[in-house]
Amino acid sequence: MKIDDQIICKVTGIQSYGVFVSYEDYNGLIHISEVSDQYIPSIEEILCVGDEIEAIILEIDEDQKRLKLSYKQANPINPRIQKMVKIKIGFHTLSKALPYWIEKTKK
């Protein structure tokens, strides 16, 4: 096992800041920034405890038997599909509301 290897690990816990996983005798963390490039209101919408998922190894701590992993690098969204999918929550919603807020503030 080395950095940039793709592994299959098991989700053991989910927190607002990331996903805990296990792989062989290692514990790992997938930080929320490594789950997706898109806005995710809740990680539970994507992953559940008990899921077996693919992830890329970013760092290995042999002494502590811990891994830092990336889900999004192992499961990229095809760029053509990403362009076709409308983002319903996040910046686009704010960008639509911004002109209204500016006009309201001017008055």
Image: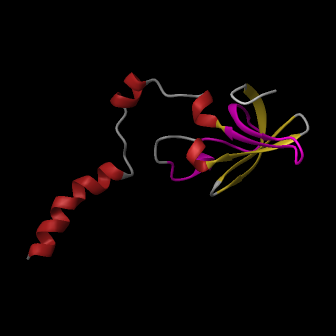
Name the image quarter holding the N terminus: top right
- Quarter of the picture containing the C terminus is bottom left
Given residues 36 and 64, the one toward you in this image is 64
In this view, the residue in front, 65 or 75, is 65
Task: Identify the residue at image location x=10%, y=74%.
Answer: 106
On whether residue 85 falls in the magenta region, the answer is: no
Who's the residue at 11% across and 67% down the image?
103
As drawn, is 76 to the left or to the right of 69?
left
Horizontal side of 50 relative to 93 (left or right) equals: right
Q: Compared to 94, does 2 lie above or below?
A: above
Quick check: is 59 in the magenta stretch? yes
Using the image, determine if residue 67 lies above or below residue 3: below
Above or below for 18 versus 71? below
Q: Magenta region: which residues?
A: 40-69
The residue under the point 59% across, 42% down is 34
Residue 11 appears in which quarter of the rendering? top right
